Image: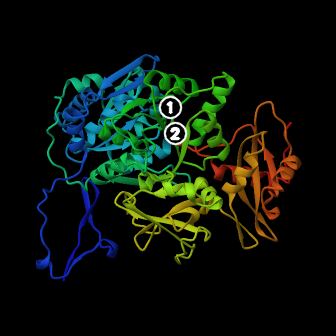
Amino acid sequence: MAVHVFAWPMRATQHVLVIDLMYFVIHINTETFMKSTMQDGPLGLPLLLRHVASVNGRSRVGSFDAQRQRITRSFAELAARAGRLGSALEQRGFGIGAVIGTLAGASPEHLEAYLGVPASARVLHTINPRLHADQIVHIASLADDEALIVDAANLGKFREFAARLPRLRLLVIVGGPLPGDLAASLPYETIDYEALLAEGEPRLDWPIIDEHETAILCFTGGTTGLPKGVGYSHRSVWLQAMSLCTANSLALGSTSRLLPAVPLYHVNGWGLPFAALMAGADLALPGASLQPPDLLALIDAEGSTLAAGVPTIWSDLLAHLRATQRTNLGTLTTIACGGAQVPQSLIDAYAALGVRMLQAWGMTETSSMSAISQTPRWIASADRATQARCAAAQGRVVCGLEARVADLDGALLPSDGASVGEIQIRGAWVTRDYLGLDDQAHLHDGWLRTGDLGTIDADGFISLTDRVKDAIKSGGEWIPSLALEEAIRSHPAVLDVAVVALPDARWQERPGAVVVLTSGHAANSNELAQWLIPRVAKWWLPERWEFVDALPRTAVGKIDKKHVRRLMLERIDAAAPATEPS
């Protein structure tokens, strides 16, 4: 018996030995196995760069610049410019594995960095400009960023930490001049992005890279502490992009016109740009603006057929459509929506516009879109209860990933659609480790503990009920905050809501609700409680109600329940009465 132990790369410049029984390859009597006749070539960004240039070169990317002027480039132009970027970095002495950070929006230039930096054997580090300056300094230092590509629109954020990055030796500015006072204060070289490209050659023949090396570094949102780094390998980026092209996922192809209304720093834009480049799907990039008028203008200009983004984006766009009395979305037929629970009311509203909304589920650690709610053919003949359960689910994991459910002590639970526990997942594009951290608490027998509570049924449909950190356990029974929020949100006066756990002397925890009312509508806590009585179990009714103008959100646009809970606890500690809408 031969046991093969692999050196698993954590970063392009650092390898560690990983011993994991889940990934041992054990061969018994190996001499009896027939060797395949297939060629062996690594999957990675150099291969994708060449494919984009030689096969999908006529596909296009469209966007608006800072002055709202339309930009269009062919994929062939994009590939040539990406090659120039990699070449210029190489000529400037940024070696193999050098980490190049970006502080940029969803622009064509950022997409060029997506290709050119990792294809040339450097590592791309996408930084969320909405993070606090201290968090950015932490992650840029941990990643050892040597260069930083910054949009002119993000120079204000850059000023907050410009002098705190000792490893940085080059600042690249996209889309505008660097203010003289800032340039004079910097201890490193600065250059305009176009000037940097002019130094390089449109090189496509980059050498073969080990497919397990890090291609892109992305950090979590830091909602429960400091952001944690996930290093996506060339192989994982490739495989996840391929999964998005399959019919059971988004069915991206050369006839698709994709609008990822997702910041490119948020889980690599959910992997959507790579999938579009692979498939030859035309891309519409929203630049720095995800505001409804700008998104609508982009849909109209580019003829987008498929879009993706978090529920907040589509709630805001729906409100804009209603305010402007527009009754259609032009060519758009499908929206993939994830990042948070998708309200049924939102799904129904878009269905009335002729747009199908697909729920999706994933996280930074799973390369984002890991499950999607495509409906199999047999659903049409299933009973109504099954149809309803599958329609409300987050979907089934795509082929290549596996999911299971376990209780919080780690004991496996049945996939019966009823047993609630933590969803666990594993696969070739799921993280094994975090950059610079030895703690393995996020794993259970090689499976990633997602922190999401829910069920999995016999057909593989995942239905989420809560986050572990947001779960409400009252009198020993779970109250699913997502389902309770959905019931509250169904009231016509409610625009948005967050439900959190509050301490209770008798029941340990009870739900509290923070509500945002729709402009021009009125409702009070008693009315909302009466609305819930026929819709949820009586013991689910919130113990306390608060009314606010807007819910606090994280750096990636999700409701910040940690902040919501703190707000409610502060009012309770102050013995303040629950608020009612004025």
Q: Is residue 340 above or below residue 417?
A: above
Of the residues shown, which amino acid type is indicated by label 2? Ile
Where disc 1 sits, the SS reads loop
Quadrant of the image containing the N terminus: bottom left
Where disc 2 sits, the SS reads strand
Q: Can residue 224 be spotted in the picture?
A: no
Residue marked by disc 2? 335
Residue marked by disc 1? 332
Q: Can residue 113 be spotted in the picture?
A: yes
x then y, percent, for residue 107:
39, 29
x then y, percent, for residue 47:
21, 44
Q: Residue at x 85, y 41 (%)?
A: 523
The reply to whether the C-beta atoms of the residues labelled 2 and 1 are less than 8 Å apart is: yes
x then y, percent, for residue 324:
66, 21
Name the foreground residue: 129 vs 278: 278
Rounded to the nearest whole Å, what is the CA distance between mark 2 and mark 1? 8 Å
Q: Is residue 191 above or below residue 111?
A: above
Q: Residue at x 22, y 45 (%)?
A: 121
Of the residues shown, which amino acid type is indicated by label 1? Leu
Mark 2 surroundings: few (<14), some (14-19) or many (≥20) residues within 10 A: many
Name the foreground residue: 471 vs 418: 418
* Numbered mark located on residue 92 in the image: none
Q: Residue at x 41, y 20 (%)?
A: 179
